[in-house]
Amino acid sequence: MSDRNPYRERPWTGHYAPGVPHRVEISTEPVWTVLDEAAERFPRRTALHFYGRNLSYRELQEEVDAFASSLASLGVGKGDRVALYLVNSPQFVVAYFGVLKAGGTVVPVSPVYSSSELGFQLRDSGATHVVCQDVLYGNLERTELPLKGTIVTGAHEYLPALKGALAKKPPLPSGPGIHPWGKLVRDGRGRPSSIEVDPERDLAVLPYTGGTSAQPKGVQLSHRHLRACAAQLRAFFPILSEGGEAVAAALPLYHIYGQVAVLLMGITLGATIVLFSSLDLGQILSTMERQGVTVFYGIPALYEVLRSHAKTSWVNWRRLKLVVSGADSLPEATAAGWEARTGKEILEGFGMTETAGVSHVNPSHRIKRGSFGIPLPNVEALVVDPDGTAPVPVGEVGELLLAGPNIAGSYWRRDEENRRGFVDLEGMRWLRTGDLVRMDEEGYFYYYARTKDLIKYRGFSVFLREIEEVLLAHPMIKAAGVVGVKDPKVGEYPMAYVVLKPEARGRVTEAEIRDYLKERLAPYKVPRAVEFRSELPKTDVGKVSRRDLREELEGL
């Protein structure tokens, strides 16, 4: 790379908020020390709020220590993978830090997974133990996997007395290797034995990329990766105060976005984390206002629902310090509608499982709508020719490459994926994100598509997301997905799937949608067909799953 490479000049640092360093020091301590440090500084402050029940930082630390001790007595040792098959709950937080403190590696699993999806992840990761939600135990049992131990728990165990008495309590399974949560926490009182961990090399978490177009694969994230991302986020938002914030945990904690932005960042701040185990929007909104939530992380699909929800006005959104969107591109119509409704701008960010959750975000004092922001401190970013590593000029579209202390360097047991997904340049390990982006003169980045979602029609480039954005701006369209259809005469042509709003169903026609698109897109970008659906397949974080649409189209 030439010394005049504009990306090496890091123009984005000129737009950091005052006081934000270009580089931050990364702790060399294991992840669990984040909690120990918070418990030392804020022992009586509420760490977790769960439907009326509060746990202080000191109480949370004691629960984690007890659970870690019990895990060790069950044979969990350094490097053992322990799966968390749990909804958002105090148990998730206790188990997360407890596994790490016992020297193990957390394997977070989506609670909406079927038994076959669960079985794949457990087999692929080599998990020896599972911490399982009681209502999900049937799925785990159907995998018929030989596990060394299963720990079963229910939401009622951490609810206030009356709510706990009324909560659903399925019969607890019993048998060899099955352990009730409550007994382990009671029996494990005391500090666990110290486990020596190499934060640089030892895995803390083995999350699986959900993806919209490929088989999930494990991403190897060390203690240092997670500590780095939490420290980078903390430095990027100096408006947040230690011991003075309340963070809504509506995002699923099994997802790396929730783990780092909500859980680790929240505990780094000594914040109160307000946990929600289900997306009951009325309950979420009323609790947020009562608890004085100051930080809210969401995904575009959630903001789209909230911007027209009757109870959104229950929250004084202007009072919040941060309202952030990630995990998917934020449509312009959603961002504009949200701001008109609430008076609060959304900070769009970008991250991947491979970046420990976050690599870019808009600075709170200088938001550019349509951009997913600027790199965090310590993050290096390049935009290159997708077929090589040559940087493209500023303003041109290319593949995003990332390097930094929060960026993973490999996948779990995927040699071919490692060869394709990473490249060594100038002494650094770079992640090939597979995302097509551009950078403007000020260092803000803009998303276009996955490399897999760029199709060629008679040699012309067609970004499927661009078509989706135009569709979503239509006042009668609720959701849209576009895929490429192979055709030997033209290469590939776009096909659209559309969900209409209830009042438009039966009234808006395919011809009207195509006419609308013809007014806003070049002829080769207009979908050859528009198919109406009552709903579209989604990933477990709310993205439209193009993979499922393609497989359905191809009859797989």
Image: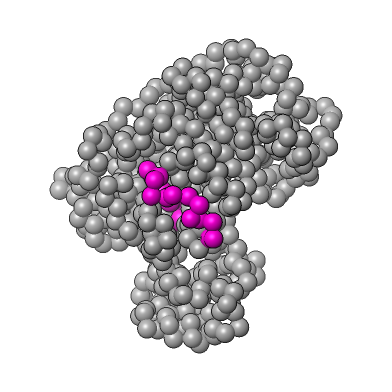
- Camera-side residue: 441 or 348? 348
Asked if the stretch drawn in magenta spans residue 45, the answer is no
Residue 452 position, x and y percent, is 45, 62
Residue 264: in sight, yes or no?
Answer: no
Q: Is residue 317 magenta?
A: yes
Residue drawn at 53 percent across, 60 percent down: 309
Q: At x 51% / y 44%, what residue is drawn?
A: 288
Tell me the quarter of the image containing the C terminus.
bottom right
Task: Tell me how the rendering is colored.
Answer: one colour
Q: Quadrant of residue 18?
A: top left
| Above or below, 218 relative to 30 | below
Residue at the left extreme of this rendering: 4
- Does 360 sit left or right of 106 as displayed? left
Magenta stretch?
Answer: 309-331
Between 387 and 362, the residue placed more toward the observer is: 362
Report which quarter residue 342 is drawn in: bottom left
x then y, percent, for residue 103: 57, 22
- Quarter of the view holding residue 206: top right
Question: Where is residue 542 shown, x and y percent of the image?
Answer: 55, 56
